[in-house]
Amino acid sequence: MKYKGIYFSLISFLLKKPMIRKFGKNKTEESIKKARVLYKRMLEKTEDIGSNNPMSGNIYSAYVFMAVCRAGNFCVDDFKEVIVEFFNNKLIGKLRGGFDLNNPEDMKKFSDRMHRMEKWADKHPEYKDKTWDFNFDEDLHRDGFYYHFTRCPLEKFARDNGYLDLLPMCCDIDYLMFEKGKGVLHRESTLASGGKICDYWIVGDKNRDPK
């Protein structure tokens, strides 16, 4: 995939403060410097999923976290703490925009967004076997919204290139993202952990007994 510096520059900039608190200034600066080089190499080894693929940002973003963690040889659990603080940054909240998955309209917007991504893949058959495959099931649950993947470019890259130990750290970001949108992700398996699917059942956090 083509290198896009904006992702690395922005995410590493916002990682810097929590990393300094956790690992110290010198270790942080050294790790980020090494990570940029590693990040470029990771993208070079990644199959192109389409320059205008709406899911491409997932790769560009996740690789920053993996590259910095690997470059600094950090403990995954320690780096998870940094990621949590990263997502608590007010700027990240502003970039994401206000979202309340307890609101049926916001849940519908999220559902529509996922379906648009599926339609993009359908319209670009040259990338369909390389990008995520969306599988929806509106009858599986009464509440919320459900879908799953059986194919994930992140998992393929991680498995083929020795990053599988870091990928679950990125999978856990899903929980943080939905939590920030006042939602709860219920998940039984991921491809990264050896499952056959990555499943997503999202409900509003006010629903105490989802069905």
Image (cartoon, rainbow, N blue to C red):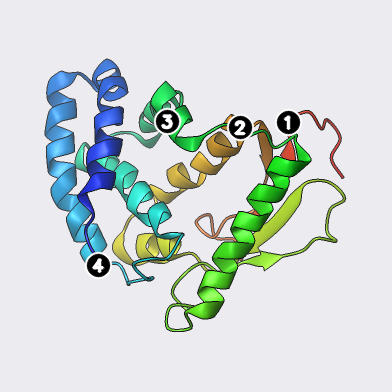
Tell which tag, 3 or 2, sits nearer the viewer: 3
**Along the viewing direction, whichever of 56 and 106 lies nearer the viewer:** 106
Q: Quadrant of residue 80?
A: top left
Q: Earlier in the sequence, mark 3 or mark 4?
A: 4
Q: Which residue is mark 2?
A: 179
Q: Residue farthest to the top?
A: 21
Q: Tag on residue 92?
A: 3
Among numbered discs 2 and 4, the one appearing first in the sequence: 4
Q: Quadrant of the C terminus?
A: top right
Q: Amino acid at mark 1?
A: Asp
CA separation in Å, label 3 and label 2: 13 Å
Q: Amino acid at mark 2?
A: Glu
Residue 169 appears at what percent x and percent y?
44, 42
Q: Residue at x 54, y 60 (%)?
A: 191
**Looking at the image, is mark 3 or mark 1 earlier in the sequence?**
3
Q: Which residue is mark 1?
A: 205
Indicate the secondary structure of the residue bearing disc 1.
loop
2 vs 4, front mark: 2
- The crowding category of the residue bearing disc 3, from other C-alpha atoms within 10 Å (few below 14, some 14 to 19, many at least 20), is few
Q: Nearer the viewer, residue 14 or 67?
A: 14
Q: Amino acid at mark 4?
A: Lys
Spatial CA span between label 2 and label 4: 32 Å
Tag 1 or tag 4, which sits nearer the N-term?
Answer: 4
Q: At 23% across and 64% down in the image, what residue appears? A: 2
Residue carrying label 4: 45
Alpha-carbon span between mark 2 and mark 1: 8 Å
Decide which of tag 2 and tag 1 comes sooner along the chain: 2
Kindly indicate whether the residue at mark 1 contacts the one at mark 2 (C-beta within 8 angstroms). yes
For marks 3 and 4, give the one nearer the viewer.
Answer: 3
Q: Is residue 180 above or below residue 167?
A: above
